[in-house]
Amino acid sequence: MTSLLSRVAIAAAGVPIVLITAYYGGWALFAVAAVAGMLALHELYRIARTLRPLVLAGYGSAATALVGATVGGYVWMLGGFLLAFVLAFLFAAVAETRQSTTVAMATTILGAGWVGLGLGHLLLIRDLPSYGRLAITTVLLTVFVSDTFAFLGGRIAGRHRMTPVVSPGKTWEGFATGAVGGVLTSWIALYQEAIFADGWRPFAFGGIVVVAAVVGDLFESLVKRDLGVKDSGGLLLGHGGMLDRVDSLLFAAPAAYFALIALGEF
């Protein structure tokens, strides 16, 4: 199966599940986020195994952050994440490893924050008053369309590398195509809705989400390059691993949450 066909197959199977659970929210969305988060975190800790992350501490903190976001909002989510420091300390105190304790704890906490807080903000967006359902759908579609258009634009017209060192496959042509697709998706989804008071704000919101998604993708690429791997895993065929699939959302969701608060009327 070619890379393009495998991407289409995975998207056709996964996107409806994500959108349906986003529509209903609650524990259904939590379940999908938790499964995706634990798989992504497992992949990160696996490729970073030489750094000896304290995996149980990371899993516990990320899971608690997601539970907190579902039942108590932002403060509870932050409290769940901060548990990573306590758990990492406790596990480091009893672990027998030749790796630096500081490095092991830092890797553990990075994973818990990156994945747990990233997906946790997606749950917070769904719980925003009045327009949470529309907001999370817009974010998901904006990231998906931006990523798809960037992939196609890069394959068809990509000539100028965007970040030769971090991610040689990304081009400015692909970025421009993805940005146009993502911003237009955001504008179409939010057109004539009362989330924003002015007509320019849906464009600004879409731009923020697109840029954050690209930065999230590049951040993961930098981590993988540092750890000497091409993909985080092979679970999703042409998409690589779960972390490869959600990397954009892990930055886009927090950016979208604060953009909605800053630009909207929540």
Image (cartoon, helix red, strand yellow):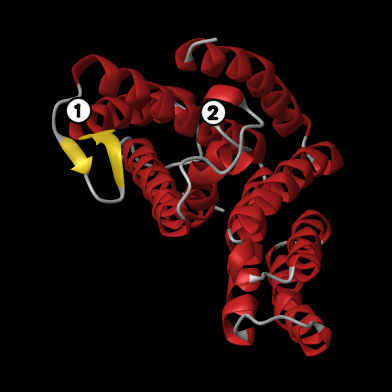
Nearer-the-camera pick, 52 or 123:
52
Nearer-the-camera pick, 157 or 34:
157
The residue to which callout 1 is attached is 173
Residue type beneath disc 2: His
Q: Which mark is residue 239?
A: 2
Image height of 138 relative to 106, above or below: above
**Residue at 64%, 79% in the rendered image:** 105
Q: Residues within 10 Å of mark 2 (few under 14, many from 20)?
A: many
Disc 1 vs disc 2: Cβ atoms closer than 8 Å? no
State the image quarter where residue 187 is shown.
Answer: top left
x and y, in percent, of residue 124 in the image: 67, 52
Does residue 137 appear anywhere in the picture?
yes
Image height of 264 relative to 186, above or below: below
Of callouts 1 and 2, which one flags the residue occurring earlier in the amino acid sequence? 1
In the rendered structure, the answer to whether residue 235 lies left or right of residue 68 reads: left
x and y, in percent, of residue 30 in the image: 79, 44
Residue type beneath disc 1: Glu
Secondary structure beneath label 1? helix
Does residue 131 appear anywhere in the picture?
no
Q: Nearer the viewer, mark 1 or mark 2?
A: 2
Q: Residues within 10 Å of mark 1 (few under 14, many from 20)?
A: many
x and y, in percent, of residue 192 in the image: 44, 26
**Residue at 53%, 18% in the rendered image:** 7
x and y, in percent, of residue 151 in the image: 36, 24
Quarter of the image that includes the N terminus = top right
Nearer-the-camera pick, 115 or 80:
115
Q: Which mark is residue 41?
A: none
Give the total of numbered labels: 2
